[in-house]
Amino acid sequence: MCDFQEPTPENLTTRRDFLRTTVLGGALSWTVPSFLASTFDTLQASTTTATQFATGKDAPILVVMQLAGGNDGLNTIVPYTNDDYYKARPQLAHKREDLLPLNDELAVPKHFSAFKDLYDNGQVSILNGVGYPNPNRSHFRSTEIWHTASDAERFESHGWLGRYFDNACEGSDPAVGIALTKEAPQAFSAAGASGISLSRPEKYGFEPTGRGEERQMQRSAYEQLNLDEDDQAGATVAEVGIPHNPHVDPLDFLERTAMDAQMSSDQIKRVAKETKNEVKYPGSNLAKQLALVTRLIAGGMPTRVYYVSQGGYDTHQNQSWTHQRNITQLAEAMQAFLSDLKAMGLEKQVMVLTFSEFGRRVKQNGTAGTDHGAAAPLFLFGQNISPGLLGAYPSLAEKDLDKGDLKFHTDFRSVYATLLQNWMQLSPAQTQQILKGNFDTLPIGVRAA
Amino acid sequence: MLEHVQNSDWNQEKAAHLLNRAGFGATQEEIERFAAMRPREAVDTIVDFEKIPDPTTHPEWAVLDPNQHNEYKAMRLFSGPEKEKQRRRMRRERNRQTNDLRHWWLERMASGPRPLQEKMTLFWHGHFATSIQKVKSPYLMYKQNEIFRQKGTGKWLDLLTAVSKDPAMLIWLDGARSNRKKPNENFAREVMELFTLGEGNYSEDDIREAARAFTGWSLARNRQEFTYRERMQDPGAKRFFGRAGKFKGEDILEILVRQDQASKFITGKLWRFFVSESLPPRLQDELARRFAGHRQVFAPWLKDVFLSREFYAPEVMRRQIKSPVQWLTSTVRSLDRSLPPTVVSQQMLRQLGQFLFEPPNVKGWDGGTAWINTNHLLSRYNFAKDLVEGRYGRGRGKNEYVMTKLTKGEPKGRDAMMERLMQSRLSRMEPVDVSKLLPEIQETPPDQILSQLENRFLSMPLKPSRRETLAQYLQQHPQLNENSLRRAIRLLMCTPEYQLT
């Protein structure tokens, strides 16, 4: 039950019905797992309180997409009328005839035309000049800064989305966040329940060995072994699972987690299998991840946050082709994703945020590539935002650069704050607690569905 | 408090507990050997590990390479694709060495002669959590690891000083970049917050002044070792913890460990690592008092702990969640098998959340219940399958460090490479030899087999309902062959109980 203001009674009925029919239906009704038990308690209580359980079915959903390696913002959103751009990049600059103008200052490359279509349809906002003070140019550290929403000089052990789970989703379903990656992103790291990561749904679960009946025997033995019989409704993993909480009995904690694992794995596998995409997706890895996200959303997962990732942006040499391939894949995957959501009537419910650990150096390097930089544009895809170009493009003039890199004017944590407050519907106090500081929300038209 | 456990109370159960917590599990023979000793003798044997000969040699590449600095310098002469090629070659070599280092250390933990030495090394690695991702030198990571190994049970100030001057630490917390004009506060902050006192036990002024005192501590890049640079040192007077003087780094460290809070902080953390998450204030005071009494030397303090009744309390025994490293090494030990091939063990530790030499952040691993979420638990269950039943690797991949040629459209990067390696021949593992673990099994009734399994793998009885489930599984296989026995062992590892030690 992620906190969510202004409950509406009719939604509540839908949710309860949903839980009864989809989660407790079928073969899974032998016992009520801890998280659901507490969910029901909450449902009873929520008619009188300001918090309620919000399933993915009717609450705003955030998809966070990492462009790993440091996307070259300059060759993505191109300042095509700026001489400094062409001077700094004799080989790498996109020629004017290879560009599709967005206005008389900025353009996108022709191979990014799928993105241009989304732009023309008002489905994307481009936020220019996003970064943070004292930018760090190490992949490792800067990724950590974006994931944990920390200052460049401070360390936070939990991720910003993990702190969202901790602060706003206490006692929730273990699938409160799903990362479509092999390992959990640091952004999900939390004191309590920290979401799920899976690269393939069929792999998220107990794998029996052997053939035929033997597999069934093992599976049912596994199910029995991980059944939490003395489960007392009320406490959930999220509540008991605080590290260094001496009052937690480890065996009890393990039994509850085992139960949750079994439940969520059955649920995810079933949803992924039974729900079908309405459109055909391209073959890229990113597109596959997004196709699965759509199925999970459409199948009614209670997940509020999804995390996907696309790699290959660390383009130190011969950047042109690699970068072209990356952003083409990105745009085409997004196009399929958004039209799939639309076909399912879910387009108003989903917002996508892209980010990259840094932009790249304004000047190209000696190997037809670019080195690690600082500020860059990021994208928000969705319906409930002011579409178009937002924020000034940072100056490329030599005197305005920070060690050869673009200067930021918008702190990425203001973007996070805007999404938490205006999209995920948290209070300013909760937002402040999650981001460990007060960051202004941005007037970019983000509003809940 | 901390009274000794009685000789008459000493038994196999307690000996096993000692071997689990002070090390990485034990075979039945080792448990019997330790159970036959008196507790004092058993604890001395474990803690005075210097007496046990250790023939392990260091990894062959882990020596100072005098040419490395020149090689880096020479890089500057290259340009264009040639430079990139060189850079990639060096990166590949670095990865190879790091993987080798991980395997070398895991081997020491899984089968080395001095378990406590490695357990302490693991503790210090989590405490002084330094990552290869920033240090970028397997040699320096190895050197730091050796400091933990050589000084890990010695005097606190000696260890702290050695680590503070350690090249990997100087890089990790930016000490090497600090100078009198621009003192870097990163190390000064963490040495108080994370290493010696804990948050809230110092002021921001203390950090600023300490940062000034640490200036001059630097790195001789060509020798890859600590050096003191007089002209980088801030010679002025500093005020630190109410004292004033022309302090240098050594003085700061000495003042820090002398604080009462310092003894409390480090013994509390060790207690949580070795014994329990629960630490009542009175016991915490007693632990600190003992440590001060031992002049802040860890070895005698550890003996106090391992001999104490509190260490063997029912709410302590079998109530610790195994760390991924503990889970892997103790499973390997109890199965009497070798470690999985490097590609597999790396993948396991990465996915289970304890990738050695890459702690998640400066605070290290949280431990306890943080080791377990639904993902980690399911991964443990499925990796148990590999460890017991073996795995078939097929397909490409001759050399595990050389990336196989990609076909078009295949994803690149470390994750993708790991994925491919996991499917290659290099990940092949033999199934466990059950006849060695459970001889003459044909004659044994299922119930007795179960008791043997419980004894060997859990050192605690399963919950009756779970025991019943496993008994049923065995009964479903009247002709018990090696395969079904292995599957039963794997299922036993797919229980909440097996995650505890």
Image (cartoon, coloured by chain):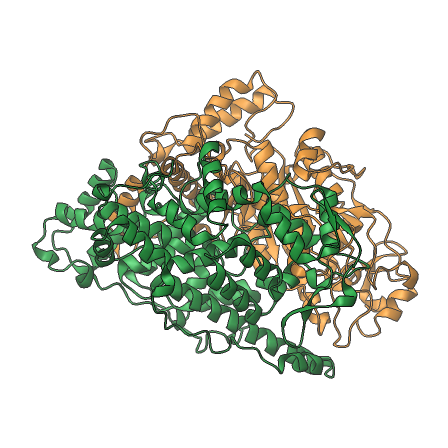
Chain colours: A orange, B green
* Left-right relation of A414 to B419: right
Figure disc tally: 0
Residue B442, given in percent of the width and then of the height, sits at 9, 57
Is A428 drawn above or below residue A415 in the view shown? above
Residue at 63%, 76% (x, y): give it: B223
Query: Closer to the camera, B456 or B291?
Result: B291
Residue B258, given in percent of the width and then of the height, sits at 59, 47
Query: Closer to the camera, B382 or A278?
Result: B382
Residue A416 in which image quadrant: top right
Query: Closer to the camera, A413 or B208?
Result: B208
From this viewpoint, is residue A321 visible? yes
Is A11 drawn above or below residue B431 in the view shown? above
Residue B85, given in percent of the width and then of the height, sits at 64, 80
Q: Quadrant of the N terminus of chain A?
A: top right
* Left-right relation of B191 to A383: left
Is A97 drawn above or below residue A195 in the view shown? below
Residue B236, given in percent of the width and then of the height, sits at 80, 55
* Left-right relation of B448 to A222: left
From this viewpoint, is residue B383 visible? no
